[in-house]
Amino acid sequence: MDAVAKGLTRNTGGARPWGAPAEALLITADGVRIHAVHRPADGSADGVPAVVTGVAAPSLAVVVAHGFTGAVERPALRRAAEVLARHAGVVTFSFRGHGRSEGRSTVGDREVLDLEAAIDWARSLGYPRVATVGFSMGGAVAVRHAALYPGVESVAAVSAPARWYYRGTVPMRRLHWVVMKPLGRVVGRLGLRTRIDPQEWTDVPVPPVEAAAVLGERGVPLLVVHGDSDPYFPLDHPRSLYRAAAAASGVSELWIEEGFGHAENAADEALIERVGEWLTRGL
């Protein structure tokens, strides 16, 4: 599948990972147009080939999946991309219903198709290998995607839930109100700039904890990162994800970060730097 909507790309150059930063609208498998941005790795930007600069052309792209209500334009996601670009080429995108992407958010269900379109685009730019990092909802999507679509090198899930329908904290009860209630969806659209699908799931997606077990069975490295001050999901969520993956493989890791809150908005430069190092180690 050609993930790039023809006529809607800019600065893609000759499909080289060291090309100038590119922006595109991607077509998902179910026909939704997704806004995506490519940032070359530092040292290979400005369209200058690595053979000229003497910098090795990056072989890995990190595709970043934001949390619910995030978007390509949000400062937290742009900061994460800037830090990760020290280690690899970076593709960011807005999930359906977010930012300049079309469609409506299904809060973790069909978003796997958005991530697959972004990965497909990264490969079309010339990257032979792709890793993913997801925050909160994006972390759950990244874990599920890797279980459904083999071929991702590694996955980092930051502040991700282990199971669906969790309402054990006040922020998650508020989030369920936004997603499930008509007035809540109005608040989501006007206040949070997120367009939410009013239809409930007909088939409940495989829970992230079960998808993590599939990654373990396949030997796909999974990094689970969570804060001990996360207001949304308590520590049994990251521990469940890690145990599910580690039970079948020894290549997964669990980081419980002291004082860390939730997702990309709370992740500082030092933490994202460490995640970038983990994703690219051994490459």
Image (tube, rainbow, N blue to C red):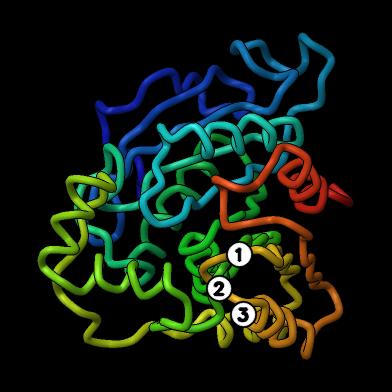
Tell which of 32 and 224 is nearer to you.
224
* Marks 1 and 3 close (CB-CB < 8 Å): no
Mark 2 vs mark 3, foreground winner is 2
Which residue bears the numbered disc 2?
A: 233
Q: Calculate the distance from the C-alpha at mark 1 to the C-alpha at mark 2.
A: 6 Å
Task: From the top left corner, tell me how far across and down residue 162 is, in percent.
Answer: 56, 80
Q: Is residue 35 left or right of residue 249?
A: left
Marking on residue 230: 1
Do the CB atoms of the residues marked 1 and 2 lie less than 8 Å apart?
yes
- Answer above or below: position of 232 versus 86: below
- Mark 3: amino acid: His
Instruction: Give the spatial CA distance, label 1 vs label 3.
Output: 11 Å
Q: Which residue, as the protein is rendered here, is positioned at the far front?
A: 170
Amino acid type, callout 2: Phe
Picture coordinates of residue 179 (x, y %)?
25, 68
Local SS, label 3: helix
Q: Position of residue 211 (x, y in %)?
A: 56, 81
x 22%, y 86%: residue: 202
Q: Residue at x 38, y 68 (%)?
A: 108
Disc ID at residue 237:
3
Q: With respect to residue 211, does 118 lie above or below?
A: above
**What is the spatial separation of the Cα atoms under label 2 and label 3, in whole angstroms?**
6 Å
Question: Residue 246 appears at what percent x and percent y?
Answer: 78, 83
Question: Residue shown at 29%/53% (left/top)?
Answer: 96
Q: Residues within 10 Å of mark 1 (few under 14, many from 20)?
A: some
Disc 3 residue crowd, few under 14, some 14–19, many 20+, Cα 10 Å: some
